[in-house]
Amino acid sequence: MRTKINLRDFNSAQNRREFLEKELDIRLDNIGCFSFPEDQAVDRNIENLIGATQIPLGVAGPLLLAKSEKRKAKSYFIPLATTEGALVASVSRGCKAVNEAGGAMVFVENTGITRGPVFKADNLEKSFKAKAWIEKNFKTLAKAAESTSSHLKLLKAEYQITGRNLFVRFYFDTADAMGMNMATIATGEMVKIIENKTGVKCISLSGNFCIDKKPSYLNFILGRGKKVWAESILPKKLVIDTLKVTPQEIAEVVERKCHIGSIISGSLGYNSHFANIVAAIFAATGQDLAHVVEASMGVTSAEVLENGDLYFSIYLPSLVVGTVGGGTHLPTQQEALKIMQVCDVLEYSQVVGAAVLAGELSLLASLAEGSLIKAHRQLGRKERSRESTKAI
């Protein structure tokens, strides 16, 4: 095999495929089937393009989001791109239960996307002086940051000093964009000023204080992107009739699995499978898939109320999403976003939170009932029959 070939030297995806087919003695016919404009993908999303990977796309729902002070009640379909049999069916079952209970109540807080550079100072005194300068001149830095984009606003900054290291965590409102690139460019402009005015040196524009695409208690506690809360109160009879278990059984699984099990495992996620639902929606709608790791964190809560009904809730502290930019412009992802019928990133975040609630409820009910193996045998195997599929 030749090792000095530079795939960037080929001028099209087809030419790269043909080279690989000849070099590796393989066929790439399916990879070569894609509908997005090649030049747009190369400009925005990918290098050394050879084609596309297809993921089966299903739809769960409809899922009702209940009326609140800030929104009318509305139902949504949820596009889910996944290779895991039973996931779409499970989320749909959760949607049914939540709908029958009057819908999900959802709240979203825009915490802001973050970028956290690390600076090196001569000593602790210089670190504290630099921190004080940033705090005093925050408006000047905000002006510089916001000059890089009309859609960006600097919200606040937080700090940590250790040894000769000064970490600064800047928070940005990036409108409907996920905004990581916007935040990086804006931070770069501020860093120039900070270095010039304080004498500290930026060692890395990202000092892992952001903290981006890694599970972290900092993001868990302070939040990143969007914080999302969702809840539903399900009458006892509904739980028994639809989910085939009692509220007490679901609450016990949440306590022993999601809470105690997560504690003894050292997990940063006190839930059963947030990542499953988030990853499927992200893949369908063009989100940055690496941010699933942050969205996998979060807490599931369940209580049996005095009247015997089930209170069920989820909390996502770090949902990093956008409805413009990134992969959201690609044709199939655009169509998936149209299925959701959302007007902005806050509404999108509400739907994701409600979908996580529905999917979490359904899986925990299945675990409580002991039907998880049966569902996966019937819906997750190649050899399943039409009859067994209809039975679920």
Image (cartoon, rainbow, N blue to C red):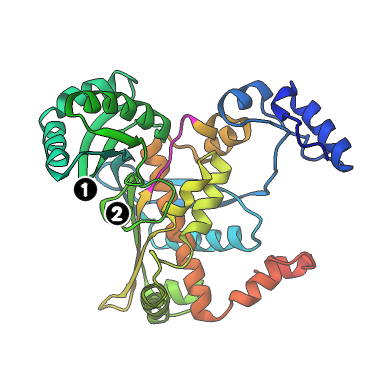
| Rendered-image quadrant of the C terminus | bottom right
Nearest the viewer among 155 and 122 is: 122
Counting other residues with Cα less than 10 Å from the Cα at mark 1, is it few (<14), some (14-19), or many (20 or more)?
Answer: some
Give the mark, 2 or 1, whose residue is nearer the N terminus: 1
Q: Measured along the vertical axis of the image, is residue 141 above or below residue 90?
A: above
Answer left or right for 84 relative to 62.
right
Nearest the viewer among 141 and 381 is: 141
| Residue at disc 2, secondary structure | helix
Which x, y percent locates residue 313?
34, 63
- Does the rendering let one see residue 287? yes
Q: Which residues are magenta?
A: 319-325
Number of the label disc, if any, that sits on residue 160: 1
Give the quarter of the image for residue 311: bottom left
Q: Amino acid at mark 2?
A: Leu
Residue on which the image places disc 2: 218
Q: Are marks 2 and 1 in contact (CB under 8 Å)?
A: no
| Rendered-image quadrant of the N terminus | top right
- Does the rendering let one see residue 390? no
Which x, y percent locates residue 240?
46, 77
Q: Measured along the vertical axis of the image, is residue 181 above or below residue 87?
A: above
